């Protein structure tokens, strides 16, 4: 934008940060660190070409880039990260409270290149896809659609709180068909005294931490696991 390799812009309650992952020089790193620290928006969304996490067979995760960028993202409360590079669609299981998407098949598909792994929450490599994203206050609605009009993934994300204590309490809502069928589950991670641990067990039917020593459970406004 305007000849810049990296930049940021705001839309209502969301701020977007665009990076040049081809050349992550010290100047760019200092810039993104400062921009993220100063942002007071409800949503912090970052996008760039090379994925920090990917199950694509051709390229896969850019581990060196992850080591550089992820600590900044976690420290400053980034909510969502979008990348491409691998010509597939993949939604990564939340990593340290951050949602990652690989959206690389819109322009060109590399069929059969998704090698589903422990990282994969959802994925598709049978047709070209694109994403629709809509932010409505404290919810981000996402939908991945093939060129034939088939929805292959959808859901709703609510941002985690921004304080260090509250970052371990967040809401996951999953679409099951139409939006009217969305169901909500809330979690308080009872292990959040362990560095880097974020509860992502959104599919459990019972308390995901049943049996854990409850004396270790921190209190955040009295919130505990509920259905």
Image (cartoon, rainbow, N blue to C red):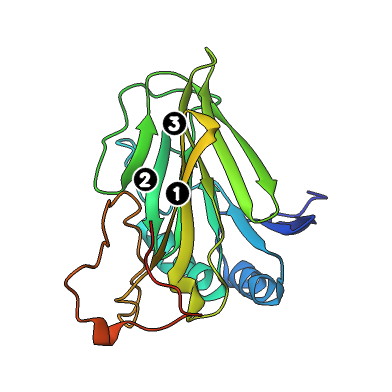
Circle 3 residue: 87
Asked if labels 2 and 1 touch by Cβ distance under 8 angstroms, the answer is yes
Residue 213, how many percent across, how many down? 20, 81
Q: Which mark is residue 51?
A: 1
> Which sits in the foreground, 113 or 26?
113
Mark 1 Cα shell of 10 Å, populated few (<14), some (14-19), many (≥20):
many
Q: Position of residue 156 (x, y in %)?
A: 53, 45
At label 3, counting other C-alpha atoms closer than 10 Å, the crowd grade (few under 14, some 14-19, many 20 or more) is: many
Residue at x 67%, y 64% (from the top left corner) = 42
Residue 6 is tagged as none
Earlier in the chain: of badge 3 and badge 2, it is 2
Q: Is residue 23 above or below residue 115?
A: below
Image vertical order of residue 18 relative to residue 154, above or below? below
**Residue found 26% across the figure and 57% down from its top:** 206
Q: Earlier in the sequence, mark 3 or mark 1?
A: 1
Image-based side of 79 in relation to 97, left or right: right
Residue displayed at 37% across by 19% down: 126
Circle 2 crowding by C-alpha within 10 Å: few under 14, some 14–19, many from 20? many
SS type, badge 2: loop
């Amino acid at each position: 934008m305007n000849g810049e390799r990296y930049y940021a812009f705001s839309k209502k309650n969301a701020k977007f940060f665009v990076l040049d992952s081809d050349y992550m020089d010290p100047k760019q790193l200092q810039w993104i660190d400062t921009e993220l620290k100063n942002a007071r928006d409800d949503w912090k969304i970052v996008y760039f070409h090379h994925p920090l996490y990917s199950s694509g067979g051709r390229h896969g995760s850019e581990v060196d880039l992850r080591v550089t960028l992820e600590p900044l993202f976690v420290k400053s409360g980034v909510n969502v990260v979008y990348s491409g590079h691998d010509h597939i669609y993949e939604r990564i299981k939340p990593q340290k409270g951050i949602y990652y998407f690989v959206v690389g098949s819109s322009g060109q598909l590399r069929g059969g290149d998704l090698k589903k792994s422990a990282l994969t929450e959802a994925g598709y490599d049978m047709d070209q896809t694109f994403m629709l994203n809509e932010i409505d206050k404290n919810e981000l609605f996402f939908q991945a659609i093939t060129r034939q009009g088939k929805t292959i993934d959808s859901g709703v994300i609510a941002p985690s709180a921004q304080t260090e204590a509250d970052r371990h309490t967040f809401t996951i809502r999953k679409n099951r068909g139409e939006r009217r069928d969305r169901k909500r589950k809330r979690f308080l991670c009872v292990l959040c005294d362990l560095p880097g641990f974020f509860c992502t067990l959104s599919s459990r039917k019972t308390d995901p931490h049943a049996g854990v020593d409850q004396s270790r459970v921190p209190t955040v406004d009295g919130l505990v696991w509920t259905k």
